[in-house]
Amino acid sequence: MATSRRLARWLPALAAPAAYALHQSYLPASQSSSTCQHSQLDKLITREHVQELESQGFVVIPAAVQQVLGHAALERARRDASSCHFGKSSNRGQTVRDDVVCWISASDDSPGEGLVSCGALLRGAAAALERHGYRGSRHHRVPLLLQLSRFEPGGRGYGRHLDCNFQSAFELGISSWLRAAGSRARVLTAMVYLNDPDWAGRDGGQLRIFHGPQWDGSRWRDHTDVFPAGGTLVIFKSPQVPHQVLPPRKVDRHALTCWIAGKVS
């Protein structure tokens, strides 16, 4: 009996490290942000961008790819994106989203020089923000895999959502909850659009970012629409910024996304 009581006291302590190790094994392969620095992006991102991200939860930098890598790099990335082999996303066909995706590895040059260059730019976002004093999150980890998504005309887009899954193990089941470990760790979403730089409002495909009521000079609005013009860089707080993707009307819409893990400050 005494042995059983002692074992009962020790089991939680013994199980905790094993549970932690199991949870960690489901996190995506990643690197410290300090190893992913991008010197040219460091020069583009400013303290003002950081303050905007901290205060409103998102920041938009038009023509970032062109400013950092050049117009030719954007065109190469667009060609690379159009020739990728896409597969169905995990919940394609549901009411949530209707896109196809391709995973791009930072350790693989085969997707093409343009995509590789844009991927390196995205993976340098966390270090650039840190360099300019970002305090919204810390201990950033940058994934090796980036997601290239394609939304096609006539689809449903992607319904309103957060980039973090806060559902419990009781709601998801232990297996699904473990698979969602990477989603729970996200603190920043960084993406660049690989579309025509002259993408206009009539083309649809907006990223709709929801926020509290804001006066835009003529009326109160509860959201901001970001048009996916080629080269635009968008960064937002993954756990805090609800958003949706409206379907494009005329041509395919491509975006390359990096989900940065860390700890919320």
Image (cartoon, helix red, strand yellow):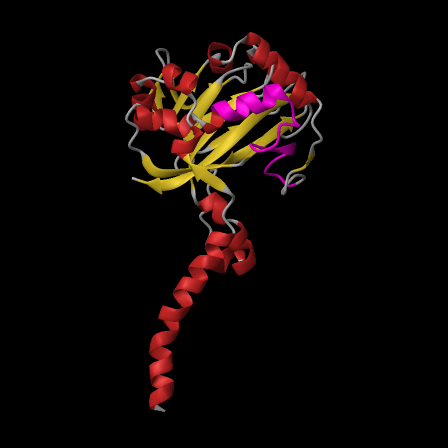
Image position of 258 with respect to 63: above or below: below
Image position of 116 with respect to 163: above or below: above
Viewer-closest of 182 and 150: 182
> Which quarter shows the N terminus?
bottom left
Q: Position of residue 129 (x, y in %)?
A: 35, 26
Left or right of 76: which side holds 259?
A: left
Determine if the magenta segment contains residue 119.
Answer: yes
Q: Position of residue 147 (x, y in %)?
A: 58, 32
Left or right of 213: which side holds 30?
A: right
Identity of the residue drawn at 48% across and 44% down: 183
Q: Quadrant of residue 127?
A: top left
Image position of 133 with respect to 145: above or below: above
Identity of the residue drawn at 62% across and 39% down: 95
Whether residue 103 is visible here, answered yes or no, is: yes
Q: Position of residue 16 (x, y in %)?
A: 39, 64
The magenta region covers 94-121
> Which quarter shows the C terminus?
top left
Viewer-closest of 150 and 220: 150
Q: Residue furthest bottom?
A: 1
Q: Position of residue 98 (x, y in %)?
A: 64, 33
Whether residue 252 is visible here, answered yes or no, is: no
Count of marks, rendered view:
0
Left or right of 108: which side holds 87?
A: right
Determine if the magenta segment contains residue 211.
Answer: no
Viewer-closest of 230 and 74: 74
